[in-house]
Amino acid sequence: MKSVEADSGELLAALASLEKHVTTAAAAAPPLPKESAKVIQLPLFHKEAPAAPNAVLRSALFPAIHSKDRRFLNNELIASVDGVEVKLKGEQLNQDDLEVLLVVEDLAREQPDTLTCQTSERGLLKLLGRVSGQTNEKALSESLVRLGGMVTLKLGRFSYLGGFVQHIYTDDVSKRYVIQLNPRLGALLRSGWTALDLDTRRQLNGKPLALWLQAFYATHDRPFPYKVETLRELSGSRTAQLFKFRQNLKKALSAWAASGDIQGWKIDPDTDLVHIIKPKKIGTKPRS
């Protein structure tokens, strides 16, 4: 019987062979115009934390819902701020999937030329703050598949179509992953991105609305007031009754404030506007 190390080595050898084949094919192809090369060139990520496109965080693409409430979307329009159009074809994402994307991206930053990371299943779950076990292992695998689904983001005259994850290689014996993010995310990130504090998000684990609020408002250097109803729509909440959502929102805001990420919040009883006071921590790229 072959050893785990041998099987893992075969996987990596196969990947090396595949990479060599791709490189050879690319060398034989005619050179791309310089402008095209700039489009796929990856931006430098924030040195303190992984980043996500503002267009993604300012929408319900990663909604504040639990896994049991997911739906399959057939290129359906998703709630987003003005100026951004978001569609998804595939199983609905949520904040758990955003966590997986951020952790994979954090690992992939060590290979900026390919955005590929090699990691064990156990190690990836540990970084996510999840214990090893069949349930979490299955959830992780399914999350990575969802992150490869087709997303359409339209900003003005320009559109992006593609997934967040490009390739996933697995070894069922050694329980190792080789994951490559989509290099063309660079063009989307350059339209505006925000680095997210993973330590803060660990404190909000299991609280999808608080996690969504943290990601959404992180894209705002100086948050301006939003109506409670607007936040319900943008967060993708399934809570039909506005008063009930308002109650949930207050709990989520209190949990977020307890993490120390914001200095305070209030909901104006007359206008129903939500006001957030937050210190400037990990910032947003100037273009947004």
Image: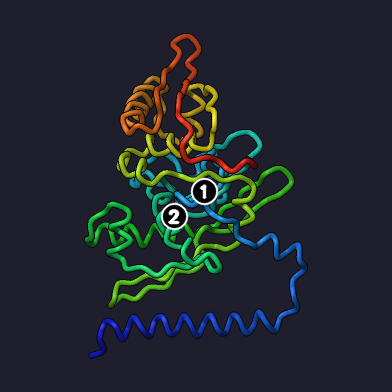
Which numbered dot is residue 221? Answer: none
Residue 112 is situated, as x and y percent measured from the top left of the image, at: 53, 64
The residue shown at (48%, 29%) is 231
Q: Quadrant of residue 82?
A: top right
Residue 198 is situated, as x and y percent measured from the top left of the image, at: 38, 46
Secondary element at image label 2: helix
Is 83 on the left or on the right of 121, as rendered? right
Q: Earlier in the sequence, mark 1 or mark 2?
A: 1
Gap in Å between the C-alphas at discs 1 and 2?
Answer: 9 Å
Q: Amino acid at mark 2?
A: Leu
Q: Quadrant of residue 243?
A: top left
Residue 240 is situated, as x and y percent measured from the top left of the image, at: 41, 28
Among all residues in the image, which is located at the extreme bottom?
A: 1
The residue shown at (60%, 60%) is 42
On screen, 212 above or below 23?
above
Identify the coloring: rainbow
CB under 8 Å between callouts 1 and 2?
Answer: yes
Q: Closer to the camera, 102 or 93? A: 102
Secondary element at image label 1: strand
Residue that badge 1 annotates = 52
Q: Closer to the camera, 13 or 164? A: 13
Is 31 on the left or on the right of 103, as rendered? right
The residue shown at (74%, 75%) is 31
Identify the image quadrant of the N terminus. Answer: bottom left
Residue that badge 2 annotates = 101
Q: Closer to the camera, 237 or 281? A: 281
On screen, 172 above or below 38?
below
Mark 2 neighbour class, 10 Å CA radius: few under 14, some 14 to 19, many 20 or more = many
